Image (spheres, rainbow, N blue to C red):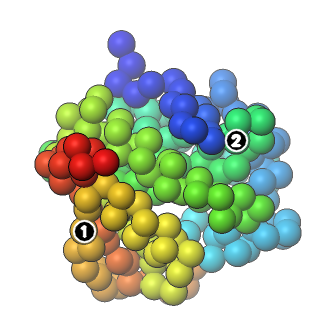
Amino acid sequence: MDVFPETIETDSLVLSRLSEANVDVFELYDLFAGGRDGVADAFEYVPQEPYASVKDARDQLDEAAASCDDGDAAQYAVYTVDGTLAGYTGLFLEWDRRTGRIGFILGKSHWGNGYAEECALALTDLAFDRLDLDLVAIGHEEGNGRSKRAIERFTDSVGGQYDGILRNWTPIGFEIADHYRYTVTRDQYQRAQTEQ
C-alpha cells in the first residue's frame, strides 16, 4: 500500500503525484523554463533555479517519484479544475521529528487565487489524518510578501502560530536568506476544526 495518495482534490485544485506517469514533462518545462515570462519572479525566493532544459524538468519528476517511493516526501503537481498545470507542492517528512514541512511554487499567472492556501490545507490534512504526524511547518523567505500573506492566512485558519526567524537559513543563488517559520500542531489543528 502506498503511504501517499495518488491524487488529492480540493475545491479548486487537483493535486497529482509529481512523476513522469502523471505530469507531462514538456508542460512542466514550459511553466518553469528559465527566460520565460514571469519565471524569474516565481523563483525569486525559491532555493532552486528555473529549468535550463527539458532534462532538468524530467530529473525533478524522477527525483520526486523516488522521494515518494522512499516515503521521504509527498510531492504533487498542482492542476486547476480545468486541467491547467499551475505549479507543484510538497510535504517533506522528518519522521524522527513527526513533522512535515510544506513547500510550493506556482506559476506567476496563477498567483492571487488562493491556491497556495488550498495546497497547504490539503497537505496539512494529509499530515495529520493519514500520516499521523504531530506538527506541520511552513515558511517564507525574507522579502517574500506574497507568501507571507498567504501563509499567515493559512496559519490563522488552522489555529497555528508564528515561531520565529531562522537566520541565514535558505541558500538562494549567491545569497542566504532568513526564513520565517510558522507551525501548527495536531491539537491546534483539531481545535480549529471544531471551532469552524
Can residue 68 be seen here? The reply is yes
Instruction: Give the alpha-carbon distance from disc 1 to disc 2, as whole Å.
Output: 29 Å
Q: Position of residue 8 (x, y in %)?
A: 51, 31
Tell me if 143 is positioned left or right of 168 in this view.
right
Q: Position of residue 100 (x, y in %)?
A: 30, 49
* Numbered disc total: 2
Q: Quadrant of the N terminus?
A: top left
Pointer 2: what residue?
80
For mark 2, does the 10 Å Cα neighbourhood hold few (<14), some (14 to 19), or many (20 or more) residues?
some
Q: Which residue is at a point 51% across and 86% down the rendered structure image?
A: 143
Q: Position of residue 74 (x, y in %)?
A: 43, 38
Compared to 91, does 44 lie above or below? below
Toward the top, the furthest residue is: 1
Which of the pair 134/25 is nearer the observer?
A: 134
Choose the circle earlier in sequence order: 1 or 2: 2
Tell me if 27 is positioned left or right of 103 in this view.
right
Tell me if 156 is positioned left or right of 188 in this view.
right
Residue 161 - label: 1
Identified by mark 1, the residue type is: Gln
